[in-house]
Amino acid sequence: MFFKYLRKPTPTDLLTSGESFQYYEYGMTWMGWRSIPMCQPIYGILSIFIFAWSVYYLPFGLLISCVLDIKNYSPSELLTVFQLFFDAVGTPFKVLFLRLHLWRVHKMKTLLNEMDKRCTSMEERYEVHRWVVRCNMAYLFFQSAYIGYTMSTFLSSAFSGVLPWRIYVPFLDWRKSKARFWITALHETFLMVFAVSQALITDFYAVLYGIMLRVHIRLLIKRVEKLCTDPDKSENENVEDLINCIKDHKLIQESAQVIRPVIARTIFVQFLLIGITLGLSMINLFFFADLWAGLATLVYMNGLIMQTFPFCFVCDQIKSDCELLENAIFHSDWVGSSRRYKSLLIFFLYNSQKSVEFTAGTIFPISTGTNIQVAKLAFSVVTFVNQLNIADRLTN
């Protein structure tokens, strides 16, 4: 069953951390990222076509159309093309970076499954299962939202009698007949469904990883809080529990180190583009768009925010959890412990102060504060356009 990874937990059938990427990997298969052993040659050909069509053809198609047909564009149509063009230009780079570092995603999943082995109690396994289900639900929600933008733009254009995105199609003039118009419009819509799905693949792996990393950090905090609280355990057993917690923390840091290079590159590209595209969208919404185009632009702006904000928010939560881990280590019941235990605890406390953080292009931290600063650029663009009366000049 397709929805078996959304099932309720039962003691004999619990999901693992790696399965939080299940629907994400389904999407990768449909988009040509994962080969199918049974029909690998055919899949390889289709994969090349899908990437060439939905990743590389899209920005060139928009640019060619803009050059050939710019005189016939209304200001709203021109801004719609520009906002999509800048967003589409970033996708090939994000796809390239993720493709080159896809092995890191697979290794990160392996490390998450290693962390699961320390979840020995049923309470911990249930907690992992619940968050795996939430991750799978989150992917389905975001996939629906991305496709929702595509369909809303298509419908708004259909009601207005214009093409949704004006993507260039060789040997097909959509103005000559209604049949050609609908063929071109449907081609654009299918192309955009694949394009936004490719964008989701390059954006959402980090969110899924960040959520599951938080789960294991919080479970580690609970284990630390239980150290030396069982009166039936000997000193050696308490030392063993502490060593296991240190190993868990090492796995957490190792997984972050593995995935950090690919996150740094893909999020950096997105940060570079979101301010420009969001600014163009706001100009279109405030000055030029009609009702249907305005609704489509609102959905698109929501999609832009969804590309970066969730992971930025998760990064803030991870940083907060790392601080809670430090406090949990310091306030654990260590007063009456042996010298060896205290030495190990000091070593653990020192390492825990190295918080799990991610940066965009190793330049600025990934956080909601950074995301807000980038989004402010959009308001700066709108203010600039308003002060120079550029909107009135384009309208006239």
Image (cartoon, rainbow, N blue to C red):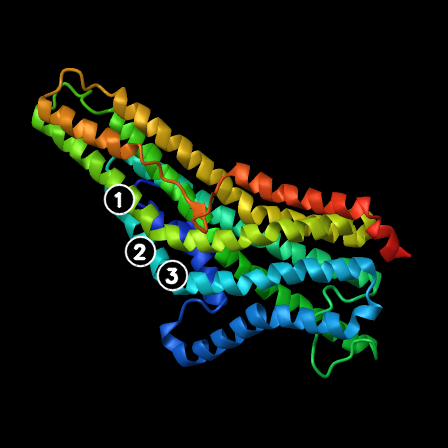
Crowdedness near tag 1: few (<14), some (14–19) or many (≥20) residues, C-alpha within 10 Å: some
Whether residue 62 is visible here, answered yes or no, is: yes
Label 3: which secondary element: loop
Amino acid type at image mark 1: Leu
Taking 125 as reference, is 150 left or right? right
Q: Which mark is residue 260?
A: none
Q: Are marks 2 and 1 in contact (CB under 8 Å)?
A: no
Label 1: which secondary element: helix
Cα gap from disc 2 to disc 3, whole angstroms: 10 Å
Residue at (46, 65) in percent of width and height: 96
Cα gap from disc 1 to disc 3, whole angstroms: 19 Å
Sooner in the amino-acid sequence: mark 2 or mark 1: 2
Whether residue 119 is visible here, answered yes or no, is: no
Q: Are marks 1 and 3 in contact (CB under 8 Å)?
A: no
Cα gap from disc 2 to disc 1, whole angstroms: 12 Å
Q: Which mark is residue 101?
A: 3
Residue 363, percent from left and from top: 46, 47
Taking 83 as reference, is 329 left or right? left
Residue topped by disc 2: 107
Sooner in the amino-acid sequence: mark 2 or mark 3: 3
Amino acid type at image mark 3: His
